[in-house]
Amino acid sequence: MKTIFGFRWQPSKDLLAIVVSWVLVVAALYAATFLVGSEVAGGMAYFGLYAVLGATIFGIGIPLYWTVVVRKRPVSDLGLTRDRLALSVILQLAFAALQFIGAYRDLKIPAWESLLPLVALALAIGFFEALFWRGWVLLRLEEAFGLIPAIILGSALYAAYHVGYGMPLEEILFLFWIGVLYAVSFRLTRNIFILWPLYQPLGQMVTLIRDGLELPLIATLGFAEAFIVMLVFVWLANKVYHKQLGKKNQPVS
């Protein structure tokens, strides 16, 4: 069905996959925040629920599995593509520079041993957020309802996700507009490298520093390992897709 002013009505089974993945990601975050807590005693369990189960398995694994194995589509359908890569990087650098000038001017940067784990967190979780919220949720919603409804609904889901952090309503409403900003930025090129690894993670770093989050230095290794697993998932999904493509193109004997 053709779009009219950015609207369409073409729902598919992808919407069910989005709902399931959203519920699982939020549930993992909520359990990490309220059932375990990020204190030292529950640090490993919190990390396991938040970064491993929530962000890596549910947030990266489900979109990749559904896209490649179930729908038999390439990982490029999630914004992981070389298309418009140069333009995406150039725009990201411009956006990140403006963000840095505006947000970091009066920000007190912590010492390196406190800063390093926050950088690792922002890079790993930033990759998850770019792929999950923009490449997965936004683009699937756009296929079903068109661009404008996808931006609105996707940003609402992104904002509502933060109830898992226990954020008050006014902050969640603010995050809706942040979601709109990132969604519009992403749709300029449909490539997650317009958001990551600088633009979106820098925004997250501002929040982490202002909230006074303190993580042990060893957390750097944990988030780095989670990020490596995310990349392995992407690599495996890409390999599976090309294997499927090869079988499809084999001549019938």
Image (tube, helix red, strand yellow):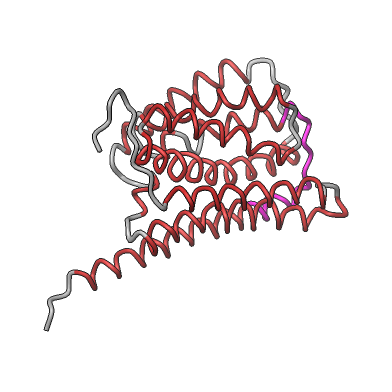
Q: Nearer the viewer, residue 95 or 180?
A: 180
- Is residue 180 left or right of 239 when viewed as pictured? right
Q: Is residue 233 above or below residue 248?
A: above
Quarter of image, res 239: bottom left
The front one of 90 and 13 is 13
Residue 173 among those drawn in magenta: no
Q: Position of residue 123 (x, y in %)?
A: 57, 43
Q: Residue at x 49, y 56 (%)?
A: 231
* Farthest residue, direction bottom: 253
- Magenta stretch: give its range: 209-223
Image coordinates of residue 78 in percent, x first then y, are 40, 47
Residue 169: image location, x then y, percent: 71, 26
Q: Position of residue 118 (x, y in %)?
A: 68, 40
Residue in the picture at 45% in, 61% down:
65
Q: Judge left or right: residue 15 versus residue 128.
A: left
Count of numbered badges drawn on the protein: 0
Which of these two is toward me, 203 or 1?
1
Tell me if residue 90 comes above or below residue 137 in the rendering: above
The quadrant of the image that shows the N terminus is: top left
**Residue at x-position 32% and y-position 55%:** 74
The C terminus is located in which quarter?
bottom left
Quarter of the rendering containing residue 246: bottom left
Residue 219 is a magenta residue? yes
